[in-house]
Image (cartoon, helix red, strand yellow):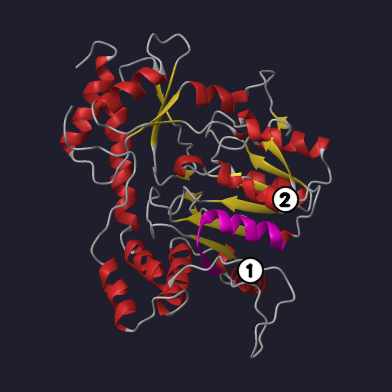
Amino acid sequence: MEKNRIYLSSPTMNGLEQQYIQEAFDTNWIAPLGPNVNEFEKEFVSYLASKEPTESFENGLYSTALVSGTAAIHLALKAVGIKKGDVVFCSSLTFAASCNPIVYEGGVPVFIDSEEDSWNMDPKALRKAFKKYPNAKAVIVVNLYGTPAKLDEIASICSEHNVVLIEDAAESLGARYKGIQTGTFGKYGIFSFNGNKIITTSGGGMLISDDQSMIDKARFWATQAREIASHYEHKEIGYNYRMSNVLAGIGRGQLKSLDEFIERKKKIYYTNKEALKDIEDIRFNPIPEDCQPNYWLTCITLKDTSKVKPIDILITLENNNIEARPIWKPMHMQPVFADCDFISMVDDPKGISGKIFECGVCLPSDIKNTDEDMERIIRIVKGFWGSR
């Protein structure tokens, strides 16, 4: 086995983070809250707004830095007013963090299948879902692996039904749809800074909205819903969800490298695609024309007729000290959500998302991958088809 480990998507530090961390130590702002938190929130929405000024930003964007993207989704659902029994539509092909918070508030997840163009939520299936559940209270759309969903169409459907759209942009920071940054199409946008994301704070998330009053409310809930008083006064249930000043310092440094990181991820995607283009069994995660993804993960699917199966690639890469992963297992196929409804435009109970899962692999997409690392990965994958 070759010694140096190639990771799927590990943290990449640029050195600037240490400056902000040191400031936190020098000023003893170690505990939650502090200057880095305030500045990270401002700098984050400034990045989103600066890329393509549109009417979406006329009234400004507001944000609150949190301990995770999951916490951001939870507070967004709480802001919407989800109560026990309320139906919430959610992309099925995603990680469990997208839908678990629905259950926290007593809501009922209904999962929406993918469409082949982007692997994201199928707008046709969403329309079908509204016919079955006309009283649904919210929609959570996920931008899978850094590629935007058909956000304008989905936002329009939500508007027609007077339903709040929550955009899960945990994987798509820096990606754009029709020139507009992802995370800004819904009433609420959520982002994740988990260790495997395109930028990281080791753990953390951000909730954004153009509604300042709701961001203020979310920030209040995230600080244990403590009322303004000389003593500890609580009239509502709150949560310990605020990001620490130290972690926010890491985020400030990371944000300065985001555009560079996107370019590196893009190179990984197209290097793989060019090298494997002659293998007819392989298809890459699609990129619709109107999208500028952040290329967070490079993924492939194999034809049903392929002699090579995803597990073969995963095991062989691991045996060579290279980390790869299966595609997310859709939520409608998860045992914990076995009783939840699934809306699809195909007759197969697995849906399009289930087929993508069964024939898919997430290839190593680490920003630090060298040309030699890429050659090593590609050589192993091509070897299954007798090609070097």
Residue type at the position of mark 2: Ala
Q: Along the horizontal axis of the image, is 224 left or right of 256? A: right
> Along the polypeptide, which appears first: circle 1 or circle 2?
2
> Residue 68 lies in magenta, yes or no?
yes
Residue 183 in view here: no
Q: Along the horizontal axis of the image, is 167 left or right of 144? A: right
Q: Which mark is residue 218?
A: 1
| Residue sticking out furthest to the bottom | 230
Residue 8: image x %, image y %?
33, 39
State the separation of the CA atoms marked 1 and 2: 17 Å
Residue type at the position of mark 1: Ala
Q: Mark 1 and 2 residues: CB-CB less than 8 Å, in contact?
A: no
Residue 66: image x %, image y %?
52, 64
| Residue sticking out furthest to the front | 231
From the viewer's side, name the closer residue of 229 and 268: 229
Q: Residue at x 29, y 67 (%)?
A: 17
Determine the image quadrant of residue 226. Answer: bottom right
Single out the mark in the foreground, 1 or 2. Answer: 1
Q: Residue at x 37, y 13 (%)?
A: 308
Q: Disc 2 designates what residue?
A: 138
Q: Which residues are magenta?
A: 62-79
Circle 2 Cα neighbour tier, 10 Å, few/some/many (<14 / 14–19 / ≥20): many
Q: Which mark is residue 12?
A: none
Circle 1 Cα neighbour tier, 10 Å, few/some/many (<14 / 14–19 / ≥20): many
From the viewer's side, name the closer residue of 152 and 10: 10
Residue 110: image x %, image y %?
72, 38
Report helix, strand or loop for mark 2: strand
For residue 11, above or below residue 133: below
> Residue 363 lies in magenta, yes or no?
no
